[in-house]
Image (cartoon, rainbow, N blue to C red):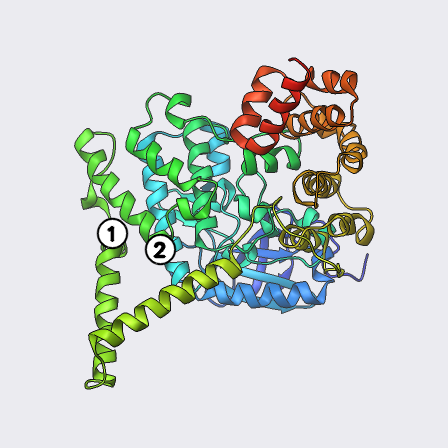
Amino acid sequence: MSNDPQASADLTGREIGDYRILRRLGAGGMAEVYLAEQRSLGRQVAFKVLQPVLARDANYVARFQYEARAAAALVHANIVQIFEVGHVGGVHFIAQEYVRGRNLGEVLKRDAALNPRLVLDVLRQVTAALCKAAEAGIVHRDLKPENILLGNSGEVKVADFGLARMESTDAKTLTQVGVAMGTPLYMSPEQIEGRAVDARSDVYSLGITSYHLLAGTPPYNGETALAIALQHLNSSPRAIENVRADVPSGLARIIHRMIAKRPEQRHQNAAELLADLRKLAGEAAAQGWGEGLEDWPLADLIASADSRSRAAAELGRLMKEAAQLEPRRWRPSRALLVLFGAVALGLLGAFLFRTRGYLDGRRVANVERRDSAWAQLFQANIAPSEEAWRAVRRYFPGQDQYIYDLADVGLVRYYLFYSQSPDYRDALPVLVSLSQTSEAQSPNSSLRPFVYAGLCVVNQQLGRDDEALAAANELNGAMRDELRRTDARIYDMLRESLDELGQ
């Protein structure tokens, strides 16, 4: 037998500290999950054991323990409670509340889709959990049906706050872990782009999950992670009410706001979403498809109070404190000066620190090696140059093709849009290489319209009309419509090239 305490496939029957392992419940990318008995308290717990490959990474273990302990402070009816984070005999574990029931992923496999009444109830309870997490400054980062548990008595609990916050420093490990940075079916565009995430990213993932619960399938699907990621970045989902006719218009409106591409177009935090759901609950009761506010717990009603009232009260409190600090020196003229100064600083900060789309950017002279391929992609995004995009391959050989495809798309866009003048000759071999990938060759790929539109434009500009026409013939009407909706700049260049070709 191996000396590695975590090497055995099944820990059933073992005693680890205060816990006796009863049976195996399942496994994920990061942890094996067991049902265990905590002997000192005589209660059953879900016992999560960190996977051996991750347990050997000291930095990962340290982050695992830190984040799990932070999540343990979240005590709420809709959050799976963490009881203990420990390390016994080489086994790193989390002992947490055992919820008798199933996760929503399992429910979907049986029922395909849920009725709007239940989806509204799930939304309310998960959003209440996110409100609690927001108080501690915690962002889940991996909301999905499998992390939302439906108890036998009807309660909804969100799991894996401790695990979901972890970020690997190695892109290969990231691919293996899968959920460390989110699951592609439910990831927000800013997560895919490698940008910082906040509560609005959780709102997006919850919106995608709710869409899945109603439609029976996620709004974006594909054979590869890249196919799904590109749709999150570029494609507009089919209106949920067109997928399922019995979805109430108010519920559809909220979900489509939640899954807006740009974070500023979504609910800005869980409290704002809960306030919207509170209004919808009143409509649902009046229309007969949902429960009224009488079924909402008092804590949820308080949390969903009009955020504008809370903001006004907070502003009043701050103004009162300022008046107490400087009762004689505070004058309207000074207040206006401070106000205009704050606005000016805000505008300056917005200009200096504005976020950019994944494929937008400006030149940089020097390209430093980052800690991971994902970090290198992010660097190329915020300060693009030819060398920045090529550095992804040079510094990180042997990565998943998905990462290289993203880098090549960024490089093409740099050649076409951000170099001093369009560099069609350099863009051509990159586009040819992209066209030979399995992703671009897939008929339903979101990458395919970009690649063949680019090939048409570049070949036409280089006087290679036959090759340009051949590329244009690969673009059917649906692909051109998709390009017009999702990438207007490439689409306009394609139209100009087709006009030159007499098409």
- In the rendered view, does 398 fall on the left or right side of 277? right
Please tell me which of labels 2 and 1 falls first in the chain.
2
On-image quarter of the N terminus: bottom right
The reply to whether residue 17 is in sight is: no
In percent of width and height, residue 130 lies at 40, 54
Q: Are marks 2 and 1 in contact (CB under 8 Å)?
A: yes
Label 2 amino acid? Ala
On-image quarter of the C terminus: top right
Give residue 53's quadrant in the image.
bottom right
In percent of width and height, residue 288 lies at 20, 29
Q: Name the disc covering residue 159, or none.
A: none
Q: Name the disc covering residue 297, or none.
A: 1
In percent of width and height, residue 266 lies at 40, 45
Please determine whether, in this image, residue 454 is positioned above or below residue 259: above
Q: Nearer the viewer, residue 77 or 413?
A: 413
The residue at 26%/76% (across/down) is 334
Task: Say few, some or many: other residues with alpha carbon within 10 Å of mark 2 (under 14 / 14 to 19 / 20 or more).
Answer: some
Please determine whether, in this image, residue 20 is positioned above or below residue 233: below
The residue at 66%/13% (across/down) is 502
- In the rendered view, does 163 fall on the left or right side of 78? right
- In the rendered view, does 485 fall on the left or right side of 258? right
- In the rendered view, does 477 fall on the left or right side of 345? right
Q: Nearer the viewer, residue 268 or 477?
A: 477
In percent of width and height, residue 84 lies at 52, 66
Q: Nearer the viewer, residue 399 or 116?
A: 399
The reply to whether residue 240 is in sight is: yes
* Residue that label 2 marks: 77
